[in-house]
Amino acid sequence: MHFFSDNATPLCPPVIAAIAAADREDHGYDGDQWSARLDAAFGDLFETPVSALWVATGTAANSIALACLCPPYGGILCHDEAHIVVDECGAPGFFTHGASLMPLPGEGAKLTPDVVAERLAAIRPDVHQVPARAISITNATEYGRVYTPDEVAALGSIARAHGLGFHMDGARFANAVAFLGCAPADVTWRAGVDALSFGCVKNGGMVGEALLFFGAERERRAAEAMRWRKRSGHLFSKGRYLAAQILAMVEDGLWLANASAANAAAQALAAAATGRLLHSVEANELFLRLSASEAAALRVQGFDFYDWGAGAARIVTNWSQDAASVAPLADALRRLDHG
């Protein structure tokens, strides 16, 4: 059983069906009927006008969003273990033509208002220092922690007070909403978020993420994002195949159903490993204390996962699993403590 990453899973059947249904002649680039439905589909989901476009990858979605929110001389406040800091090969700086990431600490890879406010207060208002121009958070975070609507709103208030753009990396946004049980709007635009990278690939898609813009500046920013998408080589000539996948996710609730299954699988494993958890399990990632011998014992039984530093491991569940299907790993984890 594979628990490496939710990137490694097969496609969910409705996505395959949507790709097949789009496999006919239509307009190129984003002029097709599927791409034309994205704004309305996401507008219905988020209960507000939305400007939405597809891009190939989460890195592109994050970086294009930040390029629309932060000028080259500006800074982006983010967690020091955020994906944009440690896993995107400098892409935000590349897309923004030089904007600086301003990494900050926080338990569970979450930013707190106090830490952000303290960093902002330390920036002198002169030309010799990089001015903050945006905040970027990840929901769910790199350690599987979830920002609540109130926590996002507290950061959104700081962003508004300081004239900062507010971006959310939502590679696992569906898992966060499934955990919270809230309306998607409550943890995004109602809380001050300007741009959201809405993840689909980790949730059963093949290729294609959605970049969403909210608020009064949404159309202007989306138009700018379209330029960045083309300039960076992310404007697919047959974009309908990306749009069709995204629509299959959001129009009938598949995005939330898939995430709920993955979250349930993670909770079943968490219940079997309560004394080993390094972080509370709120989405579909578990970080466990495992000795090298314990990790080897699990791998001999056919369970694959990543080591996460010395004496620790990361286990990621996915849309194709549920509490019943991960029972063999749950039993194996219990045996480590009682065998």
Image (cartoon, rainbow, N blue to C red):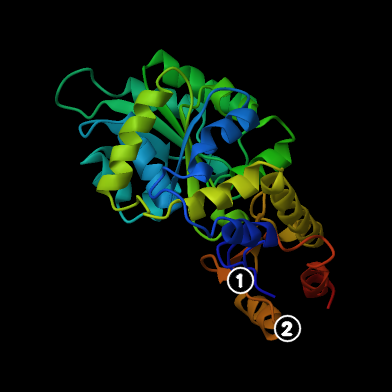
The foreground one among 150 and 216 is 216
Identify whether 239 is placed above or below 306. above
Furthest toward the top, the residue is: 161
**Direction from residue 332 to residue 172 in the image, left or right:** left
User: Element at badge 1?
Assistant: loop
Q: Position of residue 112 (x, y in %)?
A: 52, 30
Rendered residue at 64%/80% (across/down) = 293
Rendered residue at 47%/20% (across/down) = 215
Q: Which residue is mark 2?
A: 301
Q: Amino acid at mark 2?
A: Gln
Q: Amino acid at mark 1?
A: Phe
Regarding residue 76, the answer to whether it shows in the image is: yes
Q: Which residue is mark 1?
A: 305
Q: Position of residue 251 (x, y in %)?
A: 66, 41
Rendered residue at 15%/22% (across/down) = 127
Q: Position of residue 41 (x, y in %)?
A: 60, 35
